[in-house]
Image: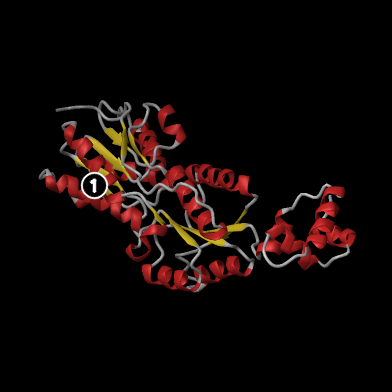
Amino acid sequence: MATIRDVAKLAGVGIGTVSRVLSGKGSVSPKTLLKVNQAMEALNFIPSSAARSLVSKKMNTIGIWGTETSGEINRETLRKIEIELKPFDVHLIFADGELNSKQNPNASRESFDSLVNKGCDGIIIWGSDLPALEVLQIENEFPNIALLNNKIELIDDKCFYFDHYQAGYVCGQHLIDNGHRNIACITGWLETDDGNKRHQGFLSALNDNNVNIPKELIFEGDYTYRKGYDGALSLLKQGLPFTALFCGNDQSAMSAIAAITNKGFEVPNDISVIGYDDMNIASYTSPPLTTVRIPFNRMAVSATRRLLNLCYDLELDINYDFPIQLIERSSVKNIG
């Protein structure tokens, strides 16, 4: 495959001249322009991403930095981002944010800087647990960023987020609307902003309906299957009756259902369960899981388009509206 250097050699000009022809910027004489065009035609030259980088000073690379790039939902979201980048021949590279690293407090910023040093044209910051002041400092030094699953008012046009507080409220209200008053909870990771907000929203729904939840019926989880299973067992051992269980994510909910079933109870006849995320498998559990759908894919597509617009002077459509959607299946029973 011919390169920009091959074109320059055949045309008898410098690489910089070929770059000016490709970019349409700068002065090139008609005679030289003809020679370069003839050389490109003779070589069947198609500008590669590397060639365009020489012209535009762009690396045609977008980075992703954060702590939320694992798990089934997020793997699917990453595929959506790659699909969005492909038509523009832009590539994706990763760095682990390690935002909660206790061993190395500077690990998060070091991993971000590694993406900058690799020449990323823009970076998606994926996660809600990075302090706003640090994000603002980063944005001041490196403006080509988009925030996924995070909201910072001062750079709201670069933020693509979901109202986790309101979604948690919807989950609590749904259980109450179905007659439940004795409700337990397995939280998500409360150290993260979105995990805390969904939990606080859930508690607010109960409070607004004068429903109290004793601390013994709140188990602090971490979104894993193991914590969901252990949490359900722990709640059952408390000896306090409950007819419904809210889980901070679908993984916790599915393993909680397994624990409840293994202890001889039925879902939803004895205990209703509601999750959060709407994983692909949620509609195939037994019983199918009622949950809140988080539109991560649509959020990620808009964040990616925002970066493409910032980095490459495109005008792609961007969406900032991501409404809450309760997906009602069979794991919640009306006992009212």
| Residue 324 seen by the camera | yes
Query: What kind of element bears circle 1?
Result: helix
Looking at this view, is 28 or 159 the one in front?
28
Q: How crowded is mark 1: few (under 14 residues within 10 Å), some or many (20 or more)?
A: many
Q: Where is residue 294 in the image (x, y as percent from the top left)?
A: 38, 42
> Does 310 sit left or right of 149 as displayed?
right
> Does 58 sit left or right of 104 as displayed?
right
Residue 267 found in image quarter: top left
Which quadrant does the C terminus fall into? top left
Whether 69 is drawn above or below 9: the answer is above
Q: State the residue at coordinates (54%, 67%).
A: 112
Q: Where is residue 148 in the image (x, y as percent from the top left)?
A: 44, 54
Q: Name the residue under label 1.
A: 202
Residue 175 found in image quarter: top left
Q: Where is residue 74 in the image (x, y as percent from the top left)?
A: 49, 46
> Does 122 sit left or right of 132 as displayed?
right
Q: What residue type is labelled 1?
A: Phe
Residue 34 found in image quarter: bottom right
Q: Where is residue 167 in the image (x, y as percent from the top left)?
A: 29, 45
Q: State the residue at coordinates (27%, 50%).
A: 165
Looking at this view, is 213 or 39 the one in front?
39
Looking at this view, is 117 or 86 the one in front?
86
| Residue 242 seen by the camera | no
Q: State the residue at coordinates (43%, 27%).
A: 284
- Seen as rendered, the residue at the extreme front is 30
Whether 270 is drawn above or below 48: the answer is above
